[in-house]
Image: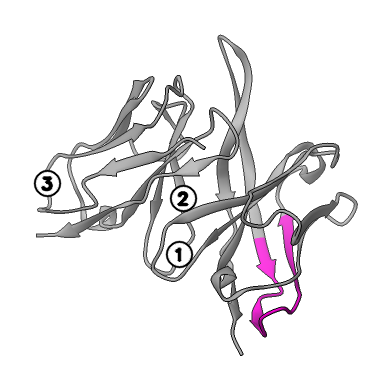
Amino acid sequence: DIQMTQSPSSLSASIGDRVTITCRASQGISNYLAWFQQKPGKAPKSLIYAASSLQSGVPSKFSGSGSGTDFTLTISSLQPEDFATYYCQQYNSYPPTFGQGTKVEIK
Amino acid sequence: EVQLVESGGGLVQPGGSLRLSCAASGFTFSSYSMNWVRQAPGKGLEWLSYISSSSSTIKYADSVKGRFTISRDNAKKSLFLQMNSLRAEDTAVYYCARDGDYYDSSGYQRGWFDPWGQGTLVTVSS
């Protein structure tokens, strides 16, 4: 199975900060990577697919980049509604696997 | 509006069985592949099972292979997960999720999850 490793596991940031989360795959996955946001007690919500394509309805402050084994999710200006846990997921091969999550907290 | 609503969760004893359902609305259910994903309390996400639109292709995670069975009824716009021989480590919120798909320069691609249902909690305990 492909292992997905996110860093950091958690971070503290202030409103307006630019935040970057990294996701590394244990082997090359081309651009077959998605990002999800999950708030406490809620289902995950898709943000990005194909490493950099924004899901319909997701604000443009979210962006993704990368290919091969290294990927990033960037939030350009953190807002109160963005405090959540973020997961990456590879869909290059079965089984689909997720990173362990990055919790974004208020500083 | 695309909507997925899970039901059927609850408390079950170790070794017991449970059948989860996922009711779909707002899209042509019979045209989409579907998945089950779970999340143990305080833990990350784990993909469990996939079923193609016509049920011709089914896949399972090793952790549930031989114990769980995915199925669907396109006429009733419903997805199911039959869970047998349940263990304490199966305690989790279970989500159904539609397969995300798109076309790129390499052709048809699929395999992420959008949207997700709200989840149903399964607790395995004596």
For residue A16, the mark is: 3
Contact between labelled residues 3 and 2, with CB atoms less than 8 Å apart: no
Identify the residue at horizontal 12%, vertical 52% (top origin).
Answer: A15
Amino acid type of the residue tagged 3 in the rendering: Gly
- Majority secondary structure of magenta residues: strand
Q: Going by the image, does A88 lie left or right of B64?
A: left
Compared with A96, B120 (above or below) is below
Compared with A60, B91 (above or below) is below
Q: Which residue is mark 2?
A: A45
* Residues at marks 1 and 3, CA–CA distance in whole angstroms: 24 Å
* Residues at marks 2 and 3, CA–CA distance in whole angstroms: 22 Å
Tell me the magenta residue range.
B5-24
Q: Which residue is mark 1?
A: A42
Q: Secondary structure at mark 3?
A: loop
Q: Is residue A91 visible?
A: yes
Question: Which chain's residue wears label 1?
Answer: A
Find residue B100 and report its horizontal and vertical position in percent. 60, 36
Find residue A33 and report its horizontal and vertical position in percent. 45, 31
